[in-house]
Amino acid sequence: MSAVAEKKELNAHLWERHPEDWYVEPYWCNRRLFEEEAFEGGIWDPSCGLGRVLYSADAAGYPVTGSDIVCRSGFCDELFDFRTCKRPRARNIVSNPPFSYAELFVRHALGIADGKVAFLLPLQWLASETRARFFPSTPLRRVYILSPRPSMPPGPVIEANVKPGGGKKDFAWYVWEQGYEGTPELKFMHREG
Ligand SMILES: C[S@@+](CC[C@H](N)C(=O)[O-])C[C@H]1O[C@@H](n2cnc3c(N)ncnc32)[C@H](O)[C@@H]1O
């Protein structure tokens, strides 16, 4: 499925598309990542939005910094387009990226981060033909399948205090570790631990 078709499928049954792909993951996705995966050094979210990734990273004891193209919260320390950024702001990059640029974000992050790179991405990426060629060329270390399916409404829906319903799409945390050469590990990540 093309990226455009994937995006249509992601949003079709739910809400109008957000112009900057601002869709907000439930807190538990980030809390569980930092419970399961250890990082050395600070955490940078280059598309931080409301800052939910950084909220959990901070609670887990990591130094945090955030950037975005639009300032949406106090977690956003800088405003810039990640695609053109050459200087990493921390050793590790952890993010729920804008869907339109997700693959580009992964490639770019792997080019500039020294430590780990973790992105919240559709599970179906594992089966996509182009990514099935791309992944073996990367230091993909772990894939955590999230359960239950997280619902990711657009930011304005969250700001309006609308309670999201159940998610309809499968997501996973994909974690890359610079220098890793083995086979990626597949794990399950349940909301309750
Ligand atoms: C999926 S949302 C992130 C949700 C976030 N975890 C939160 O707590 O709200 C993606 C974010 O990427 C930002 N974004 C879109 N294009 C970008 C770009 N080229 N560079 C940096 N950030 C971008 C959007 O403004 C949006 O806030």
Image: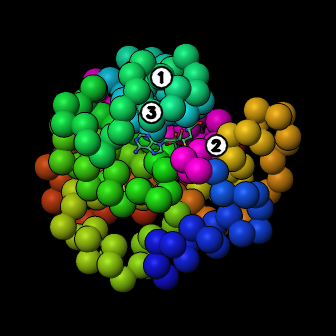
User: Which disc, if any, is residue 24?
Assistant: 2
Q: Is residue 169 left or right of residue 134?
A: right
Rendered residue at 25%/37% (across/down): 85
Amino acid type, residue under disc 1 in the picture:
Cys
For this rendering, which residue is in front, 101 or 56? 101
- Pointer 3 and pointer 1: residues touching (CB < 8 Å)? yes
Determine the secondary structure under disc 2. Answer: loop
- Mark 2 surroundings: few (<14), some (14-19) or many (≥20) residues within 10 A: many
Amino acid type, residue under disc 3 in the picture:
Asp
Rendering coords of residue 27 (x, y %): 65, 36
User: Which disc, if any, is residue 68?
Assistant: 3
Determine the secondary structure under disc 3. Answer: strand
Q: Which residue is mark 1?
A: 76
- Pointer 2 and pointer 1: residues touching (CB < 8 Å)? no
Give the CA distance from mark 3 to mark 1. 7 Å
Q: Which residues are magenta?
A: 19-41
Rendering coords of residue 140 (x, y %): 28, 58
Amino acid type, residue under disc 2 in the picture:
Val
Q: Earlier in the sequence, mark 3 or mark 1?
A: 3
Q: Is residue 30 left or right of residue 43?
A: right
For this rendering, which residue is in front, 3 or 136? 3
